[in-house]
Image (cartoon, coloured by chain):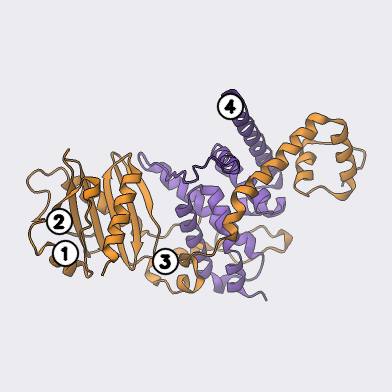
Amino acid sequence: MIAFRPSVEAMIPALRRYARALTRDADIADDLVQDTLVRALRSERLFHGGDIRSWLYTILTNLNRNRRRSLARRPAISQFNEDDEAGANGTEAEGRDIERALTGLVEEQRSALLLVMLEGLTYREVAEIQGVPIGTVMSRLARARAHIKSSLDGEKVTLRRVK
Amino acid sequence: MTEPNMPVTEDELHALVDNELPADRRAAVENWLDTHPEDAARVASWRAIGDALHARYDRIADEAIPPTLELDRLAKRPRSWMIGVAAAVLLAFAAGGGVGWLAHDASAAAVASAPDPVNAMREEAIAAHRLYIGEVRHAIEVRAEESHLLPWLSKRIGMTLRAPDLSKYDLKLLGGRLLPCSDGGPAALLMYENEKGERVTLYATPLKAPRTSFRYQETDKFGAILWVADNYGWVVSGPAGDKPRLKGIAMAAIEQGERR
Protein backbone atom coordinates (compact mmCIF):
# COMPACT_ATOMS: atom_id res chain seq x y z
CA MET A 1 0.00 0.00 0.00
CA ILE A 2 1.42 3.36 -0.97
CA ALA A 3 2.33 5.87 1.69
CA PHE A 4 -0.36 8.49 1.29
CA ARG A 5 1.14 11.66 2.69
CA PRO A 6 4.59 11.34 1.16
CA SER A 7 2.95 10.65 -2.20
CA VAL A 8 0.81 13.74 -1.91
CA GLU A 9 3.76 15.81 -0.74
CA ALA A 10 5.88 14.65 -3.66
CA MET A 11 3.24 16.01 -6.02
CA ILE A 12 3.22 19.55 -4.66
CA PRO A 13 5.85 21.02 -7.02
CA ALA A 14 4.09 19.62 -10.08
CA LEU A 15 0.70 20.79 -8.85
CA ARG A 16 2.11 24.28 -8.33
CA ARG A 17 3.50 24.31 -11.85
CA TYR A 18 0.24 23.11 -13.38
CA ALA A 19 -1.82 25.58 -11.33
CA ARG A 20 0.42 28.46 -12.30
CA ALA A 21 0.18 27.66 -15.99
CA LEU A 22 -3.58 27.14 -15.67
CA THR A 23 -4.35 30.37 -13.83
CA ARG A 24 -1.44 32.62 -14.73
CA ASP A 25 -1.50 34.20 -11.26
CA ALA A 26 0.95 33.02 -8.60
CA ASP A 27 -1.33 33.78 -5.66
CA ILE A 28 -4.43 32.22 -7.15
CA ALA A 29 -2.36 29.22 -8.21
CA ASP A 30 -1.00 28.57 -4.74
CA ASP A 31 -4.42 29.05 -3.17
CA LEU A 32 -5.76 26.48 -5.59
CA VAL A 33 -3.00 24.05 -4.65
CA GLN A 34 -3.69 24.67 -0.99
CA ASP A 35 -7.40 23.92 -1.43
CA THR A 36 -6.47 20.78 -3.35
CA LEU A 37 -4.15 19.57 -0.62
CA VAL A 38 -6.66 20.25 2.14
CA ARG A 39 -9.32 18.25 0.32
CA ALA A 40 -6.85 15.45 -0.36
CA LEU A 41 -5.84 15.26 3.29
CA ARG A 42 -9.47 15.14 4.39
CA SER A 43 -10.07 12.18 2.13
CA GLU A 44 -7.08 10.16 3.24
CA ARG A 45 -9.20 7.58 5.05
CA LEU A 46 -11.38 7.12 2.00
CA PHE A 47 -8.65 6.71 -0.56
CA HIS A 48 -8.42 3.04 -1.47
CA GLY A 49 -5.49 3.04 -3.81
CA GLY A 50 -5.19 4.09 -7.39
CA ASP A 51 -3.31 6.84 -9.03
CA ILE A 52 -2.73 9.68 -6.56
CA ARG A 53 -1.24 11.82 -9.26
CA SER A 54 -4.32 11.75 -11.46
CA TRP A 55 -6.58 12.17 -8.46
CA LEU A 56 -4.79 15.32 -7.34
CA TYR A 57 -4.79 16.80 -10.83
CA THR A 58 -8.52 16.08 -11.04
CA ILE A 59 -9.28 17.89 -7.80
CA LEU A 60 -7.24 20.89 -8.84
CA THR A 61 -8.77 21.03 -12.32
CA ASN A 62 -12.27 20.88 -10.87
CA LEU A 63 -11.54 23.50 -8.23
CA ASN A 64 -10.32 25.83 -10.93
CA ARG A 65 -13.41 25.21 -12.99
CA ASN A 66 -15.58 26.05 -9.98
CA ARG A 67 -13.53 29.13 -9.29
CA ARG A 68 -13.93 30.40 -12.83
CA ARG A 69 -17.65 29.68 -12.83
CA SER A 70 -18.16 31.59 -9.61
CA LEU A 71 -16.12 34.50 -10.93
CA ALA A 72 -18.27 34.63 -14.02
CA ARG A 73 -21.37 35.11 -11.89
CA ARG A 74 -20.12 38.21 -10.13
CA PRO A 75 -20.16 41.70 -11.62
CA ALA A 76 -17.06 43.36 -13.04
CA ILE A 77 -14.38 41.05 -11.64
CA SER A 78 -10.96 41.58 -13.08
CA GLN A 79 -8.25 38.99 -12.85
CA PHE A 80 -5.14 39.69 -10.87
CA ASN A 81 -2.82 40.19 -13.77
CA GLU A 82 0.67 41.24 -12.87
CA ASP A 83 3.40 41.29 -15.47
CA ASP A 84 6.31 41.37 -13.07
CA GLU A 85 8.64 39.90 -15.65
CA ALA A 86 8.97 43.08 -17.64
CA GLY A 87 12.40 42.30 -18.98
CA ALA A 88 13.95 43.03 -22.33
CA ASN A 89 15.43 39.55 -22.19
CA GLY A 90 14.40 37.38 -25.14
CA THR A 91 13.45 34.32 -23.12
CA GLU A 92 11.27 36.39 -20.81
CA ALA A 93 9.47 37.81 -23.80
CA GLU A 94 8.94 34.28 -25.10
CA GLY A 95 7.64 33.28 -21.69
CA ARG A 96 5.09 36.06 -21.87
CA ASP A 97 4.15 35.00 -25.39
CA ILE A 98 3.28 31.47 -24.34
CA GLU A 99 1.47 32.77 -21.26
CA ARG A 100 -0.58 35.10 -23.36
CA ALA A 101 -1.27 32.38 -25.90
CA LEU A 102 -2.58 30.14 -23.12
CA THR A 103 -5.10 32.70 -21.96
CA GLY A 104 -6.64 32.63 -25.43
CA LEU A 105 -7.65 29.01 -24.96
CA VAL A 106 -10.93 27.71 -23.69
CA GLU A 107 -10.36 26.21 -20.23
CA GLU A 108 -10.77 22.53 -21.23
CA GLN A 109 -8.31 22.97 -24.08
CA ARG A 110 -5.81 24.73 -21.85
CA SER A 111 -6.04 22.07 -19.21
CA ALA A 112 -5.75 19.22 -21.76
CA LEU A 113 -2.70 20.83 -23.34
CA LEU A 114 -0.98 21.43 -20.02
CA LEU A 115 -1.74 17.99 -18.62
CA VAL A 116 -0.31 16.31 -21.73
CA MET A 117 2.59 18.57 -22.64
CA LEU A 118 3.65 20.14 -19.36
CA GLU A 119 2.70 17.45 -16.89
CA GLY A 120 3.39 14.48 -19.17
CA LEU A 121 0.18 12.56 -18.56
CA THR A 122 -1.16 10.02 -21.03
CA TYR A 123 -4.26 10.60 -23.11
CA ARG A 124 -6.06 7.99 -21.02
CA GLU A 125 -5.12 9.72 -17.76
CA VAL A 126 -6.25 13.09 -19.07
CA ALA A 127 -9.51 11.53 -20.27
CA GLU A 128 -10.16 10.30 -16.74
CA ILE A 129 -9.22 13.63 -15.21
CA GLN A 130 -11.47 15.57 -17.54
CA GLY A 131 -14.21 12.95 -17.47
CA VAL A 132 -14.45 12.65 -21.26
CA PRO A 133 -13.56 10.06 -23.92
CA ILE A 134 -9.99 9.92 -25.19
CA GLY A 135 -11.16 11.20 -28.58
CA THR A 136 -12.41 14.37 -26.92
CA VAL A 137 -9.05 14.89 -25.23
CA MET A 138 -7.33 14.55 -28.58
CA SER A 139 -9.59 17.04 -30.27
CA ARG A 140 -9.11 19.52 -27.41
CA LEU A 141 -5.37 19.04 -27.75
CA ALA A 142 -5.45 19.54 -31.52
CA ARG A 143 -7.47 22.72 -31.19
CA ALA A 144 -5.25 24.01 -28.42
CA ARG A 145 -2.18 23.45 -30.53
CA ALA A 146 -3.72 25.12 -33.57
CA HIS A 147 -4.73 28.19 -31.52
CA ILE A 148 -1.37 28.49 -29.81
CA LYS A 149 0.51 28.05 -33.05
CA SER A 150 -1.38 30.87 -34.70
CA SER A 151 -1.05 33.02 -31.59
CA LEU A 152 2.70 32.54 -31.51
CA ASP A 153 3.01 32.98 -35.28
CA GLY A 154 1.06 36.20 -34.90
CA GLU A 155 3.58 37.41 -32.31
CA LYS A 156 6.43 36.73 -34.67
CA VAL A 157 4.71 38.64 -37.46
CA THR A 158 4.29 41.62 -35.13
CA LEU A 159 7.96 41.56 -34.26
CA ARG A 160 8.97 41.52 -37.89
CA ARG A 161 6.83 44.54 -38.61
CA VAL A 162 8.36 46.47 -35.75
CA LYS A 163 11.83 45.89 -37.17
CA MET B 1 -5.52 -2.65 -34.18
CA THR B 2 -3.15 -0.81 -36.43
CA GLU B 3 -1.90 -1.58 -39.89
CA PRO B 4 1.56 -0.45 -40.87
CA ASN B 5 0.36 0.59 -44.32
CA MET B 6 -2.73 2.62 -43.53
CA PRO B 7 -2.53 6.30 -44.47
CA VAL B 8 -1.33 8.59 -41.74
CA THR B 9 -4.03 10.50 -39.84
CA GLU B 10 -3.99 13.86 -38.16
CA ASP B 11 -4.47 12.12 -34.80
CA GLU B 12 -1.33 10.14 -35.42
CA LEU B 13 0.70 13.26 -36.00
CA HIS B 14 -0.35 14.47 -32.57
CA ALA B 15 0.21 11.05 -31.04
CA LEU B 16 3.76 11.02 -32.38
CA VAL B 17 4.55 14.22 -30.48
CA ASP B 18 3.02 12.83 -27.29
CA ASN B 19 4.61 9.37 -27.45
CA GLU B 20 1.17 7.83 -27.83
CA LEU B 21 1.79 6.20 -31.17
CA PRO B 22 1.80 2.41 -31.29
CA ALA B 23 5.25 1.11 -32.19
CA ASP B 24 4.15 -0.40 -35.48
CA ARG B 25 2.93 2.94 -36.82
CA ARG B 26 6.00 4.96 -35.96
CA ALA B 27 7.90 4.20 -39.14
CA ALA B 28 4.89 5.04 -41.33
CA VAL B 29 4.34 8.39 -39.61
CA GLU B 30 7.98 9.36 -39.72
CA ASN B 31 8.17 8.46 -43.40
CA TRP B 32 5.12 10.61 -44.03
CA LEU B 33 6.78 13.56 -42.34
CA ASP B 34 9.91 13.08 -44.46
CA THR B 35 7.79 13.51 -47.58
CA HIS B 36 5.29 16.11 -46.36
CA PRO B 37 7.20 19.19 -45.23
CA GLU B 38 4.09 21.16 -44.27
CA ASP B 39 2.98 18.47 -41.87
CA ALA B 40 6.54 18.19 -40.61
CA ALA B 41 6.55 21.94 -39.93
CA ARG B 42 3.31 21.70 -37.98
CA VAL B 43 4.61 18.81 -35.91
CA ALA B 44 7.76 20.82 -35.22
CA SER B 45 5.67 23.79 -34.10
CA TRP B 46 3.71 21.56 -31.71
CA ARG B 47 6.95 20.31 -30.21
CA ALA B 48 8.04 23.93 -29.87
CA ILE B 49 4.90 24.62 -27.83
CA GLY B 50 6.00 21.94 -25.38
CA ASP B 51 9.48 23.45 -25.22
CA ALA B 52 8.01 26.89 -24.56
CA LEU B 53 5.78 25.55 -21.79
CA HIS B 54 8.68 23.84 -20.08
CA ALA B 55 10.92 26.87 -20.49
CA ARG B 56 8.33 29.11 -18.91
CA TYR B 57 6.95 26.88 -16.16
CA ASP B 58 9.39 24.20 -15.10
CA ARG B 59 11.09 26.58 -12.74
CA ILE B 60 7.91 26.69 -10.66
CA ALA B 61 8.34 23.00 -9.93
CA ASP B 62 11.90 23.67 -8.82
CA GLU B 63 10.93 26.28 -6.25
CA ALA B 64 10.96 25.53 -2.56
CA ILE B 65 7.52 24.66 -1.30
CA PRO B 66 5.95 27.70 0.37
CA PRO B 67 5.03 27.33 4.06
CA THR B 68 1.34 27.74 3.23
CA LEU B 69 1.50 24.41 1.44
CA GLU B 70 3.15 22.38 4.16
CA LEU B 71 1.03 19.28 4.72
CA ASP B 72 1.55 19.21 8.47
CA ARG B 73 0.10 22.68 8.80
CA LEU B 74 -2.77 22.00 6.45
CA ALA B 75 -3.65 18.81 8.28
CA LYS B 76 -4.14 20.80 11.48
CA ARG B 77 -6.65 23.28 10.07
CA PRO B 78 -9.81 23.80 12.15
CA ARG B 79 -12.55 21.40 11.16
CA SER B 80 -15.37 23.92 11.14
CA TRP B 81 -13.96 25.36 7.93
CA MET B 82 -14.39 22.15 6.04
CA ILE B 83 -18.03 21.34 6.78
CA GLY B 84 -19.63 19.46 3.97
CA VAL B 85 -16.50 18.96 1.94
CA ALA B 86 -15.67 15.38 2.81
CA ALA B 87 -18.53 13.80 0.92
CA ALA B 88 -18.25 16.15 -1.97
CA VAL B 89 -14.53 15.63 -2.41
CA LEU B 90 -14.65 12.09 -3.65
CA LEU B 91 -14.41 11.76 -7.36
CA ALA B 92 -15.13 8.73 -9.46
CA PHE B 93 -12.90 7.46 -12.13
CA ALA B 94 -14.05 5.06 -14.76
CA ALA B 95 -13.19 1.49 -13.86
CA GLY B 96 -10.54 1.03 -16.50
CA GLY B 97 -6.81 1.17 -16.10
CA GLY B 98 -6.65 0.07 -12.51
CA VAL B 99 -7.54 3.49 -11.30
CA GLY B 100 -10.34 3.17 -8.82
CA TRP B 101 -11.31 4.44 -5.47
CA LEU B 102 -14.48 5.01 -3.54
CA ALA B 103 -16.79 7.78 -4.51
CA HIS B 104 -20.23 8.98 -3.66
CA ASP B 105 -20.92 10.76 -6.89
CA ALA B 106 -20.79 8.84 -10.12
CA SER B 107 -19.48 11.67 -12.19
CA ALA B 108 -16.06 13.23 -12.00
CA ALA B 109 -17.85 16.48 -11.68
CA ALA B 110 -17.83 19.35 -9.29
CA VAL B 111 -16.03 19.46 -6.02
CA ALA B 112 -18.44 21.41 -3.89
CA SER B 113 -16.85 24.51 -2.52
CA ALA B 114 -16.85 24.83 1.25
CA PRO B 115 -18.38 27.98 2.76
CA ASP B 116 -15.63 30.55 2.37
CA PRO B 117 -15.02 32.82 5.37
CA VAL B 118 -12.43 34.79 3.44
CA ASN B 119 -14.88 35.69 0.73
CA ALA B 120 -17.56 36.51 3.31
CA MET B 121 -15.10 38.86 4.97
CA ARG B 122 -14.30 40.52 1.66
CA GLU B 123 -17.98 41.11 0.98
CA GLU B 124 -18.53 42.61 4.42
CA ALA B 125 -15.49 44.86 4.06
CA ILE B 126 -16.64 46.13 0.67
CA ALA B 127 -20.15 46.68 1.99
CA ALA B 128 -18.74 48.74 4.87
CA HIS B 129 -16.45 50.63 2.52
CA ARG B 130 -19.26 51.40 0.14
CA LEU B 131 -21.59 52.52 2.92
CA TYR B 132 -19.29 54.71 4.96
CA ILE B 133 -17.19 56.45 2.34
CA GLY B 134 -20.39 58.10 1.19
CA GLU B 135 -20.93 59.73 4.56
CA VAL B 136 -19.93 63.37 4.81
CA ARG B 137 -20.33 64.14 8.50
CA HIS B 138 -20.33 60.66 9.98
CA ALA B 139 -17.88 58.70 7.86
CA ILE B 140 -16.09 57.62 10.98
CA GLU B 141 -17.12 57.26 14.58
CA VAL B 142 -13.93 58.26 16.38
CA ARG B 143 -11.55 60.78 14.84
CA ALA B 144 -7.86 60.15 14.27
CA GLU B 145 -6.95 62.91 16.72
CA GLU B 146 -8.59 61.14 19.61
CA SER B 147 -5.96 59.15 21.43
CA HIS B 148 -8.22 56.26 22.34
CA LEU B 149 -9.07 55.35 18.71
CA LEU B 150 -6.45 52.65 18.29
CA PRO B 151 -6.41 51.30 21.86
CA TRP B 152 -10.20 50.98 21.72
CA LEU B 153 -10.32 49.18 18.37
CA SER B 154 -7.36 47.02 19.32
CA LYS B 155 -9.10 45.87 22.46
CA ARG B 156 -12.27 45.07 20.57
CA ILE B 157 -10.67 42.97 17.87
CA GLY B 158 -8.09 41.39 20.14
CA MET B 159 -4.88 42.52 18.50
CA THR B 160 -2.69 45.62 18.46
CA LEU B 161 -4.08 47.62 15.59
CA ARG B 162 -1.79 50.22 14.09
CA ALA B 163 -2.92 52.83 11.61
CA PRO B 164 -0.23 52.82 8.91
CA ASP B 165 1.20 56.13 7.83
CA LEU B 166 0.02 56.49 4.25
CA SER B 167 1.27 60.03 3.62
CA LYS B 168 3.35 58.82 0.72
CA TYR B 169 0.05 57.95 -0.94
CA ASP B 170 -1.30 61.39 0.00
CA LEU B 171 -3.71 59.67 2.35
CA LYS B 172 -4.53 61.05 5.76
CA LEU B 173 -6.20 59.07 8.50
CA LEU B 174 -9.68 60.38 9.24
CA GLY B 175 -10.52 57.96 12.02
CA GLY B 176 -12.24 54.66 12.54
CA ARG B 177 -15.23 52.72 13.68
CA LEU B 178 -16.21 49.36 15.08
CA LEU B 179 -18.42 47.08 13.03
CA PRO B 180 -20.24 43.80 13.58
CA CYS B 181 -19.60 40.82 11.34
CA SER B 182 -22.40 38.53 10.33
CA ASP B 183 -20.86 35.75 12.42
CA GLY B 184 -21.17 37.99 15.48
CA GLY B 185 -17.49 38.95 15.64
CA PRO B 186 -16.03 42.47 15.59
CA ALA B 187 -14.25 44.29 12.80
CA ALA B 188 -12.24 47.50 12.84
CA LEU B 189 -12.52 49.96 9.97
CA LEU B 190 -10.02 52.75 9.50
CA MET B 191 -10.71 55.38 6.87
CA TYR B 192 -8.19 57.50 5.00
CA GLU B 193 -8.78 60.38 2.64
CA ASN B 194 -6.74 62.37 0.13
CA GLU B 195 -7.04 65.99 -0.91
CA LYS B 196 -9.44 65.11 -3.69
CA GLY B 197 -11.72 63.47 -1.15
CA GLU B 198 -11.04 59.95 -2.40
CA ARG B 199 -11.23 57.46 0.41
CA VAL B 200 -9.48 54.24 1.23
CA THR B 201 -10.42 51.94 4.08
CA LEU B 202 -8.52 49.33 6.04
CA TYR B 203 -10.66 46.57 7.51
CA ALA B 204 -9.40 44.08 10.10
CA THR B 205 -11.23 41.24 11.76
CA PRO B 206 -10.43 38.00 13.58
CA LEU B 207 -10.79 35.18 11.06
CA LYS B 208 -10.29 31.44 11.37
CA ALA B 209 -8.75 30.74 8.01
CA PRO B 210 -5.32 29.79 6.77
CA ARG B 211 -2.79 32.36 5.74
CA THR B 212 -3.16 33.64 2.19
CA SER B 213 -1.11 35.85 -0.02
CA PHE B 214 -2.58 39.03 -1.46
CA ARG B 215 -5.73 38.66 -3.52
CA TYR B 216 -7.13 41.48 -5.59
CA GLN B 217 -10.71 41.71 -6.71
CA GLU B 218 -12.86 44.42 -8.22
CA THR B 219 -16.56 44.79 -7.46
CA ASP B 220 -18.43 47.55 -9.30
CA LYS B 221 -16.34 50.69 -8.85
CA PHE B 222 -14.24 49.39 -5.97
CA GLY B 223 -11.01 47.47 -5.78
CA ALA B 224 -9.94 45.48 -2.77
CA ILE B 225 -6.78 43.71 -1.72
CA LEU B 226 -7.28 41.12 0.95
CA TRP B 227 -5.09 38.76 2.89
CA VAL B 228 -5.22 36.51 5.92
CA ALA B 229 -2.39 36.23 8.44
CA ASP B 230 -2.22 34.87 11.99
CA ASN B 231 -5.99 34.31 12.16
CA TYR B 232 -6.81 37.88 11.16
CA GLY B 233 -8.33 38.92 7.88
CA TRP B 234 -7.49 42.26 6.31
CA VAL B 235 -9.01 44.18 3.43
CA VAL B 236 -7.74 47.40 1.87
CA SER B 237 -10.52 48.93 -0.24
CA GLY B 238 -10.39 51.83 -2.63
CA PRO B 239 -11.38 52.92 -6.10
CA ALA B 240 -11.18 50.29 -8.82
CA GLY B 241 -8.54 50.40 -11.47
CA ASP B 242 -5.45 51.06 -9.37
CA LYS B 243 -4.29 47.75 -8.06
CA PRO B 244 -0.61 48.69 -7.66
CA ARG B 245 -1.52 51.55 -5.35
CA LEU B 246 -3.78 49.39 -3.21
CA LYS B 247 -1.08 46.77 -3.06
CA GLY B 248 1.42 49.38 -1.88
CA ILE B 249 -1.00 50.46 0.80
CA ALA B 250 -1.50 46.85 1.85
CA MET B 251 2.27 46.37 2.07
CA ALA B 252 2.55 49.49 4.23
CA ALA B 253 -0.14 48.14 6.54
CA ILE B 254 1.76 44.89 6.97
CA GLU B 255 5.20 46.43 7.33
CA GLN B 256 4.14 49.07 9.81
CA GLY B 257 1.94 46.63 11.65
CA GLU B 258 4.83 44.28 12.25
CA ARG B 259 7.01 46.82 13.99
CA ARG B 260 6.73 45.98 17.65
| Residue beneath disc 3 | B82
Q: Between marks 1 and 3, how big is the CA–CA gap?
A: 30 Å
Q: Position of residue B84 (x, y in %)?
A: 43, 64
Chain on which label 2 sits: B
Q: Position of residue A101 (x, y in %)?
A: 58, 38
| Residue beneath disc 4 | A158
**Residue B203, picture quadrant:** bottom left
Position of the N terminus of chain A, as image quadrant, is bottom right
Element on which disc 4 rests = helix
- Compare marks 2 and 1 and give the one earlier in the sequence: 1
> What residue type is disc 4 on?
Thr
Task: Out of B96 and A140, give the one closest to the viewer.
Answer: A140
Chain B drawn colour: orange
Q: Between marks 2 and 1, how big is the CA–CA gap?
A: 8 Å
- The chain drawn in purple is A
| Residue beneath disc 2 | B176
Residue at point 87% right, 50% down?
B23
- Compare marks 2 and 3 and give the one earlier in the sequence: 3
Residue B107 can be seen, yes or no: no
Task: Out of A79 and B56, give the one closest to the viewer.
Answer: B56
Same chain under badges 2 and 3? The reply is: yes
> What residue type is disc 2 on?
Gly
Q: Between marks 4 and 1, how big is the CA–CA gap?
A: 56 Å
- Label disc, if present, on residue B153 of the rendered structure: 1
Residue at point 38% right, 55% down?
B214
Position of the C terminus of chain A, as image quadrant, is top right
Residue at point 40% right, 58% down?
B213
Element on which disc 1 rests = helix
> What residue type is disc 3 on?
Met
Task: Sort mark 2 into few (<14), some (14-19) or many (20+) by Cα contacts within 10 Å.
Answer: many
3 vs 4, front mark: 4
Marks 2 and 4 in Cβ contact (< 8 Å): no
